[in-house]
Amino acid sequence: MAEPTIRSTTTARIVWDTADKFLRNIVDEEDYGDYILPFTVLRRLECMLAETKDQVIKYVDALSGMPQHLIDIAVKDKFGLSFYNVSPLDLATIASVDDNVDKSLKSYIDGFSNNIADIWVAFDFNRRAKVLADANRLHAVVKHFSTLPLGPNQLSNTGMGDVFEDVMYRAFNKKGKAAGAFYTPRDAIKLMVDILIANDDDSLAGESAARSIYDPTAGSGGMLLIAQEALKRMNEKINVTLYGQELMASAFALGKADLLIQGGRPDAIEQGNTLVEDLYEGRTFDYVLSNPPFGKDWSADEKAVREQARIHGSRFSHGLPSTSDGQMLFLAHCASKLSPPNKNGQGGRAAVVSNQSPLFNSDNGPNAIRQWLLEADLIDAIIALPTSMFYGTGIATYVWVLDTNKDPERKHKIQLLDGSEMWDSLRKPMGDKRREMGENHRARLLEAYKAFEYADPAISRVMTPEDFMFRDVPVYKQARLATCFSEEAVEALRSRRDFTEGHVAVMRSLDGTAWNALPKAFPLAAKAAGLKTPLGLINAVMKAMGAADDSAPLAVDRKGKPVIVPGWKITERVPLSEDLDEHMAREVLPYAPGAQWDESKAKHGTDIPFTRIFYVPEEPRPLSEINSDVQKLMGELAEMFTAVSEE
């Protein structure tokens, strides 16, 4: 086969020209992509089948009467085609006449094999063709696409993927942030794939090597295809099987078509809601990649999710996040789809994109999911990506790398990699995507990942799961109180019915008594004076006569419990990896002498304070430098005032 010669960027521009030439004033601008993408797919599939189409039509006609699935198998065996078209029409033929273009186009679409019929249904192709026909534009659009050079000899599969990326960005960027809902930029995917297969080099060799790749939020299939390409580069004979699930109809249609174009199976991507129904239930995979939607409200799926969560050991049984953000449900789902370790010691690995929320969301559900991932030692690494790297959002994003069977040196450890500053500016921003992670940046992160504990600490830290498990320990300061008689103390008690003038003399007699002795001393002195002392009065007298005194012993109430300094109570977060007393001696006591804590009342939780771990405080500027700048500014201001006064 000759090397493709057409540049994908040029082709993408030509494809998009359809919008300006034929769709304007007929279709809403935000819906251009709904028309351009299906016609682009149709033209590519047509070009792929053109060389053998006449032979296929004759062959299928000779098999008439056989069950459809057997015909599909026969065509694949003879021609190597996983899909085909038996219509005598093509776009050029339809465009050669002006009459009945819509009927001819429908007949042509119906000629495709049944195993890809759902592509056209998902694209809502017939309805969109009717919209163009009613506006008298369908013939022009068909003619335009019939001339596009989208054959395999003119444009490689990778180049076609670039065209889809460009056209899809332009199309769905018109819908605001919709592109980010199902499309991940290739630089992010390449990094994820590089990290995912980094430790599998040896096991990927040989003619019998095989790998399965799964994406539960497959979008247009980009992650699956890039992962497949990477594996094929390492071993062209490797058997790679792709699996995906996607909810959005247009993304599903494009993904299924793109995988077909790349030689994939017609059923590689299934359409459906992953949270409601796992269409690959009971299956696990060697590699899982996913870019689930950030902040997706899953209240519409809540009933189905909660029913699954009640089943012990199920994918959602470890905890449920708030219905306002379902991305941790996808993280838990991806973990559940990883293959357990096989006889060669290899386990399943996942790379899942998230925003910051799953790192430290303190709700019970996210805490429980993190706890499970940490205790099961499933988290291999977490990578911070640059902001403004994705099409639909400029916020900070992270990649969670999961592994069911880490290499021995990585077991019970988690590597954090900071790639937030590794980016180049895009020459032309694409929506919210203003930065890209070039090959040199990806190579540096991959090198750091492989170096592990020997990596540059500026971008890599190796921690333990316990470093991210904590207990929030209540810390308080115990009061030191002396017993002091005062008129203010007496006034504080006069409103009590059990307090009499006789008690005033008793209180005066106890001035200077050890405060901790008051629970016994006050009743004895009152009894000698013939007065009663109910428990409530004893408590009130102790409170009224207590005065702070740093030289006094630590105060305890009449039950022997420590008396806390009013308003002095903090909560100290202590990692489980640290000894509690050592932590307090280092972090609390130097700043709060006499502070105490109660571990029995500690609340346990998890968080991954990524930013804090990599934070490096800036050195303050020298005072002399600041003073010099101030003097310079003062001089400039003086000159300005002089100039104004002279005017």
Image (tube, grey):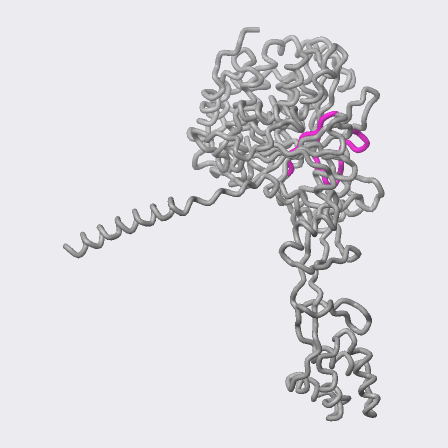
| Relative horizontal placement of residue 194, taking residue 200 as reference (left or right) | left
| Relative horizontal placement of residue 217, taking residue 96 as reference (left or right) | right
- Judge by depth and name the residue closer to the eye, 134 or 285: 285
- Residue ID at (50%, 37%): 432
Give the x, y percent position of residue 320: 74, 47
- Residue ID at (56%, 22%): 161
Q: Which residues are magenta?
A: 270-292
Give the x, y percent position of residue 36: 52, 29
Position of residue 129 relative to residue 262, above or below, is: below
Give the x, y percent position of residue 335: 74, 35
Camera sees residue 96: no
Quarter-of-image position of residue 104? top right
- Judge by depth and name the residue closer to the eye, 297 or 370: 370
| Residue 288 included in the magenta stretch of the image | yes
Main SS class of the magenta portion in the image: loop
- Residue ID at (57%, 37%): 180
Figure label count: 0
